[in-house]
Amino acid sequence: MIDLRSVLALFAAITKSWMRSKTGVFFSFLFPVMLLLVFGTIFGEQEVKYTLYVQNLDTANGKETNLSKFFIEALNSTGAFDVKRLDADVDAFKLANQQSFKVKRVLMIPKGFEQNALNKSISVRIGVITDTFARLMERYGKYINESAKRNITKGQKMLATWENKTETSKAEIILLMDKHDSSYPIIYGILRSVTNAFNNKLIGAEEIVNVTTKPLTNKKLRAADYYLSGYIAAFIMTNGIIGVTSTVSEYRRNGTLKRLAATPLSKTSWIMANVVQQTLLAILLTILMVFLGWLIFNIQTIPNFFAWLLIFIGAITFCSMGMVLGGIIKDVEAATGVGNAIAFPMMFLSGAFWPIEIMPDYLQFVAKLLPLYYFHQGLRSIMTLDNLEGAFTSFLVLGVLAVVFIPLAIKVTKWKELD
Amino acid sequence: MSGKVIKEAIDRKLTREKVIEVKELVKYYGDTIALNKVSFEVYRGEIFSLVGPNGAGKTTTVEILECLRRPSDGVAKVLGYDVLKDENEIKKRIGVMPQNFNTLERLTVKENVELIAKIYGIKSDINEYLELLGLDGVRNKKFHTLSGGMRRRVGICMALVGEPELVFLDEPTTGLDPQARKDVWNVIKQLKKMGKTVFLTTHYMEEVEELCDRASIIVDGRIIHTDRINELILEYGGGIKIIADREAGDADKILRKFTDDVFYERDSIVGRFKSRREAGKAIAELYENECKIRIVEPSMDDVFMNLVGKRIDERGELI
């Protein structure tokens, strides 16, 4: 019942009609591009950084002490902080309590930081040495001759006197921060690790356990890389569920559908033509987004065969969903409304624009019920992570949906008794 | 030539080959009956009209014949094919302009016509159709920029381009201004000359008189009468009316000599004659008495009035 010649003729006609529709082109192409540019510019280069004000009160002769300078450099080198300096004459407590002071995170390095740290490190080192000798004597004392033992004991006593002479108050840094600040645990954690590393360095200990982060792929990933596939998937979905739904019901309202139904054209050919058109649209959209991603955000992703395959299946699935909605809902405004009501929540809930991990558990559960979730996850898996196995569920879910919705679209599309 | 000879000549010309046969057609919408045992026939080469007010069942009938609706009961055959069994065979052979015709609005006239040609698999030049309908000047204009009359011509062009034997035009001139309506009439007359059979629906009586060979009058889902237009007018037109000025002295007296059916209408006196012979006598005498008179032949309006008891207004409502 599918007449290829008619399908192609109709495909060409509705594509021309779409190209000449300003709203059609806007929502299918310009809107996605705008969002990519806006969100990409805001979040694209993002490596998350926390603003941290640092006030260094540890000065000698008007100059910052070496150790406090090193500490601030160490904070900077984590890459986690956007360190801003506060002058020494500012009252940090007062400032942090001011309403106008937005970022309430101040790290104070008090006077005497270097002195205390060095003294403490000497006392700790002495403690370590005395302790080492004590253990040595305890374990291997019987092998050591008496004169050597006497010297050692003498040395231990001297060390003990020196240890008592050095001040042993700990070096301190003070973090002024509200514990309800959502980033408190992260900032506290990073600070702890910096101070630990610092402590180790000061007592001359090697780092014994080291954590190295290895990226999942060889590519350097940024937010823009991560979201590109999300945008492509989301807008193929909206083109189907909003675009197709409203176009189909508009064609029925204004009589175009009746005109076509009165020709030998079959209903299946009509649906095919729409599916082919949406597939073309999806291809163009993907090319455009990938190109802009490369041009503006230097994203080097080229969809491979499987990415294109998933894009085809996605376009077919969401187009047939649109055909079903457009077929069921008679009123044009209602059809557009329902399309929007389905597509927009799906866009935001499915995690196409941000990782679903940041959403509450029950919303994560909801996300996994949405077809778009599988579409963008699969696409990301193939395009960004080079992981074809990770897209298996996506192929399965979207494939099954296509197999269900295409016959359903054929069933609910009216080709007779059109009002 | 006598009337009988003419009638036979017309019969021969129409060849009496049935292209549409409708028997006892019934259509329900839910509990509402839209068509109640509708029967009529349409012959090859004629312009046939289904005429009636809004809601009478014209579009329902036409859309059953176009295979766009399913009949609830009865038989409808188009070009010998059953509408329920041979949808494809019928659709290949007919051309359709639906009611309130519309098409892809952002496509040009040419693109729209080409689309339909391609669907029908027609490879011949569509330009001759554009020329025939006077559309060559607007071929590259987008459909939505056209006037109502032009749109209908595009609709007829799209109905023709598939080279059909039979063309359905559902209310082809509704809502058009008088000039646009006349333009569409000229196009429809062309179709007849091309040998097409034309089935049209309308609520304009003058359209039926102007264009049609035969008509069925339909009201409330029932066919009231089907016949040739001339027959309908002669039979049910209510005879000739002679209208004289109220002040014209003897007019009243003379009219009453030949007919009982005399009445006053505004500043005129009207005599109605069933018999043309009596009317002739009255006309002769009125002229002899130098009465100023107008002779009004009966029209389809009168036929409808006499058969249905009401008239149809400009918008297609019964009044």
Image (cartoon, coloured by chain):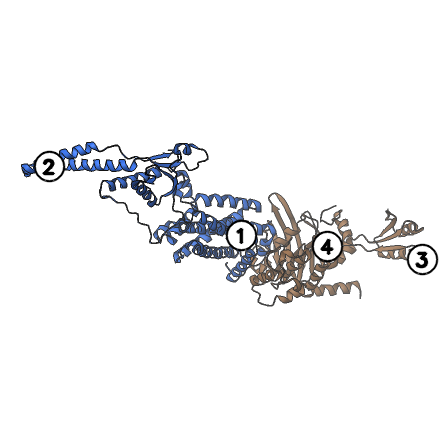
* Residue at 57% from the left image edge and 47% from the top image edge: A332
Horizontal side of A199 relative to B218 (left or right) equals left
Distance CA(mark 1)–CA(mark 4): 37 Å
Q: Who's the residue at 73% across and 64% down the image?
A: B10
Determine the image quadrant of residue A205: top left
Residues at discs 1 and 3 in contact (Cβ within 8 Å): no
Residue designated by label 1:
A26
Amino acid type at image mark 2: Ile
From the image, tell me which residue sits under label 3.
B288
- The amino acid pointed to by label 1 is Phe
The disc at residue B177 is 4
Question: SS for tag 2?
Answer: helix
Q: CA distance from mark 4 to mark 2?
A: 123 Å
Left or right: residue A399 compared with residue B195: left
Q: Which chain is brown?
A: B
Disc 1, SS: helix
Q: Where, quadrant-wise, is the N terminus of chain B in this rendering?
A: bottom right
